[in-house]
Image (cartoon, rainbow, N blue to C red):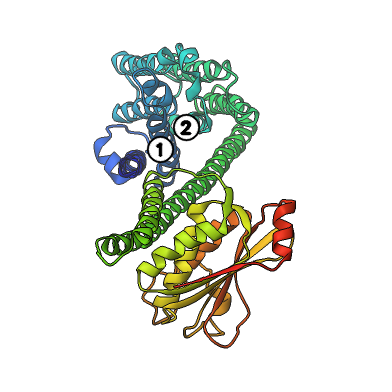
């Protein structure tokens, strides 16, 4: 997890640095700093033109960083940087052109042509192997290419042009346009981008080309100039809109991932705290049982029963530690509640059991944990070490186990919230986990745990569990009214 967050931090830093440098460099073209560096006798671009160009270059650079972080590899590095390379090609040609005086010599134009050709090779060469890395063609890549093409269109409009143009300048412009056409064609051939983005890429290339033709006076009509300017503004606005939508979606995705991660962490923390709560209760019973087993005053019959109870608790603790799931079985409440309450008595509690001889379908571990929670709460929060456990068959489907203590009871204003996670009284030494855990465990067994109506003294909780259908013999026995009672 720490590695993931470090990666995200490096990703954001890299994107910010790339975008910031690109914006500063291109903005510098239209600033006084460029005037000190340039030897051109023509008017330099305005700061506004430099900033507009810089914004699109920064967008292409940021998209390249995002795509590289997502698809980093020996071959994909250059492919995902296509948009940034297109913008870099136009940037270098523009800077070199601004550096040279007009009219330019053949050597100067040769340098411009060489830089343009190198840019063409750097862009088209990796894209020829695009079929082997088709997975990189996602929305981030498409946005990067579109921003790079738009940046190139704005940058190349800053080229100082002689009238008439030098002999090889049309060749330089032709190589630049060829770069745009070839890159877009190779990408669209894969049919991996969404249809709206594919159409926008297909429109961007001719708009940039027409802008260059207008700038070089090949299309010198004023109507053409106005139309191309409007088209260029529309294309730029469209790419900005797509970029903003993509950023918003990414932020929403990040927010969902963070929320999901937080929920996972909260859930893991709850599970650990609940498990520790169960283990503390189990260990307390084992310690008391072990101490009593060492006493010479314990009869052999009692010792044997205690050993059995202790072994059951040890098995339950092992299952808790291993996270082993236990299936629900038919539980004889006379026997199992007797074993559970024996360990409570070892802790010095006075417990009375009134049983109806019923059976329920549940997990012994869950029932033991819930009864232990209710008994421990009676002592910790109610101040009572005496409890009464009553088993009553409510109907053919349900058995109710009522656990009543004779302590301070639960204040009326706290009763509606006692099962909420972390809810506890201001003077309570607990964590507010036990009752929430107990209610969940009973719900998992198809039953329930609720707080009975206030009887004036102490508090009563009702555990309801699915009943095991009685055999005819059991029904006859129960009709005679023979239950049994055990006190301690």
In the foreground, 291 or 251: 291
Placement of 143 over or under 452, stated as above or below: above
Q: Position of residue 376 (x, y in %)?
A: 42, 71
CA distance for labels 2 and 1? 8 Å
Percent coordinates x, y for residue 457 in the rendering = 54, 87
Judging by the rendered image, the residue that carries numbered circle 1 is 62
> Circle 2: is it few (<14), some (14-19), or many (20+) Cα within 10 Å?
many
Say which quadrant the C terminus sits in. Answer: bottom left
Judged left or right of residue 95, residue 331 is right
| Quadrant of res 35 | top left
Q: SS class of the residue under badge 2?
A: helix
Q: Which mark is residue 79?
A: none
Compared to residue 121, the image places residue 326 above or below, namely: below
- Residue with the mark numbered 2: 144
**Quadrant in which residue 18 is drawn:** top left
Q: Earlier in the sequence, mark 2 or mark 1?
A: 1
- The answer to whether residue 24 is above or below residue 74 is below
* Residue 226 in view of the camera: yes
Q: Position of residue 287 (x, y in %)?
A: 29, 61
Marks 2/1 in contact by CB < 8 Å: the verdict is yes
């Amino acid at each position: 997890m720490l590695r993931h967050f470090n990666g995200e931090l490096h990703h954001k830093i890299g994107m910010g640095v790339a975008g910031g440098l690109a914006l500063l460099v291109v903005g510098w073209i239209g600033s006084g700093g460029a005037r000190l560096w340039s030897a051109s006798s023509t008017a330099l671009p305005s700061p506004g033109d430099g900033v507009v160009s810089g914004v699109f270059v920064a967008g292409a650079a940021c998209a390249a960083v995002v795509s590289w972080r997502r698809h980093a590899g020996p071959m994909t590095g250059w492919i995902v940087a296509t948009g940034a390379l297109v913008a870099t090609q136009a940037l270098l040609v523009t800077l070199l052109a601004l550096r040279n005086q007009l009219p330019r010599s053949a050597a100067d134009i040769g340098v411009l042509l060489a830089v343009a050709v190198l840019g063409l090779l750097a862009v088209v060469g990796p894209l020829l192997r695009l079929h082997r890395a088709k997975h990189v063609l996602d929305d981030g890549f498409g946005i990067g290419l579109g921003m790079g093409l738009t940046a190139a269109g704005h940058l190349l409009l800053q080229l100082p042009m002689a009238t008439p143009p030098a002999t090889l300048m049309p060749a330089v412009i032709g190589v630049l346009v060829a770069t745009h056409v070839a890159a877009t064609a190779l990408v669209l051939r894969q049919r991996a981008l969404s249809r709206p983005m594919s159409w926008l890429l297909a429109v961007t290339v001719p708009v940039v080309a027409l802008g260059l033709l207008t700038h070089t006076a090949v299309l010198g009509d004023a109507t053409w100039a106005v139309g191309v300017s409007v088209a260029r503004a529309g294309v730029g606005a469209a790419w900005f809109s797509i970029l903003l939508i993509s950023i918003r979606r990414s932020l929403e995705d990040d927010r969902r991932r963070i929320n999901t991660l937080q929920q996972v962490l909260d859930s893991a923390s709850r599970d650990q705290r609940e498990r520790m709560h169960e283990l503390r209760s189990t260990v307390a019973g084992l310690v008391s049982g072990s101490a009593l087993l060492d006493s010479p005053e314990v009869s052999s019959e009692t010792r044997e029963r205690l050993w059995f109870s202790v072994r059951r608790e040890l098995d339950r603790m092992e299952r808790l530690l291993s996270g082993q799931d236990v299936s629900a079985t038919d539980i004889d409440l006379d026997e199992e509640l007797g074993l559970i309450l024996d360990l409570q008595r070892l802790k010095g509690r006075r417990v009375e059991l009134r049983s109806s001889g019923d059976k329920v379908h549940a997990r012994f571990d869950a029932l033991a944990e819930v009864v232990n929670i209710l008994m421990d709460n009676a002592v910790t929060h109610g101040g009572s070490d005496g409890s009464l456990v009553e088993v009553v068959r409510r109907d053919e489907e349900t058995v109710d186990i009522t656990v009543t203590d004779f302590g301070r009871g639960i204040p009326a204003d706290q009763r509606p919230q006692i099962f909420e996670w972390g809810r506890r009284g201001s003077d309570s030494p607990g964590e507010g986990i036990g009752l929430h855990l107990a209610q969940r465990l009973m719900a998992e067994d198809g039953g329930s745990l609720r707080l009975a109506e206030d009887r004036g003294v102490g508090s009563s909780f009702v555990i309801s569990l699915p009943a095991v259908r009685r055999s005819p013999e059991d029904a006859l026995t129960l009709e005679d009214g023979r239950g049994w009672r055990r006190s301690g």
